[in-house]
Image: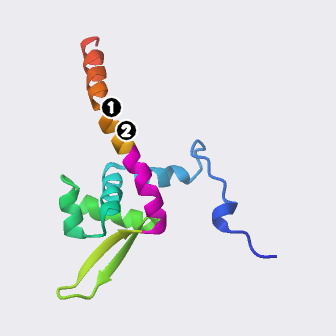
Amino acid sequence: MPDADPVEAFAADVFSRACTSREALEHVTGKWSLLALSALLEAPRRFGELRRRVDGVSEKMLAQSLQTLERDGWVHREVRSAIPPHVEYRLTPAGCELAPRLLDLIGFVEDRLPAVHAAREEHDTHR
């Protein structure tokens, strides 16, 4: 009898305190990770290109986010032996499935921004 696929055998429950899906969800929904994944959906990028695309991220935060995303299997890091050598980041197949969902979330929030601003103003005037 073949071994069960470990991915299929694990039942995730993000509402359970002990479930590691919370950590994985936090990794992909963090501000810098979400933006990096979305930018990599546009095209594979070198670190500097990605940093310029994700305006405002520090080198340290981008590097940490990319390392976490690589560890979780969303991003692939490839060292290119060009002159000068450089590193290129691209989405894995799983990352290619994830990133459009994140773009949908970004689009939803951007579309609702006028209502968000109005709600904030309403809330602040009644406090």
Q: Which residue is mark 2?
A: 108
Residue sitting at x 36%, y 74%: 77
Q: Is residue 93 left or right of residue 127?
A: right
Residue type highlighted by circle 1: Arg
Q: Is residue 13 rendered magenta in the image? A: no
Rendered image coloring scheme: rainbow
Q: Is residue 88 above or below residue 27?
A: below
Using the image as rendered, state which of residue 111 and residue 17 is in the foreground. Answer: 111
Q: Nearer the viewer, residue 127 or 69?
A: 69
Question: For residue 118, which quarter of the picture?
Answer: top left
Residue 59 in view here: no
> Residue reaching furthest top?
126
Secondary structure of the residue carrying numbered label 2: helix
Q: Give the residue drawn at x 40%, y 50%.
A: 102
Location of residue 90 in the rendering, given as x and y in whole percent from the top left corner:
35, 69
Q: Is residue 120 above or below residue 62?
A: above
Mark carried by residue 112: 1
Up-down relation of residue 126 to residue 19 (above or below)? above
Task: Work out how far the residue at label 1 is from the one at label 2, CA to CA, in angstroms.
Answer: 6 Å
Residue at the image position 34 percent from the left and 56 percent from the top: 38
> Where in the figure is residue 49, as x and y percent of width and height?
20, 66
- Residue 76 locus on image (x, y percent): 39, 72
Is 36 left or right of 72, judged from the image as shown? left
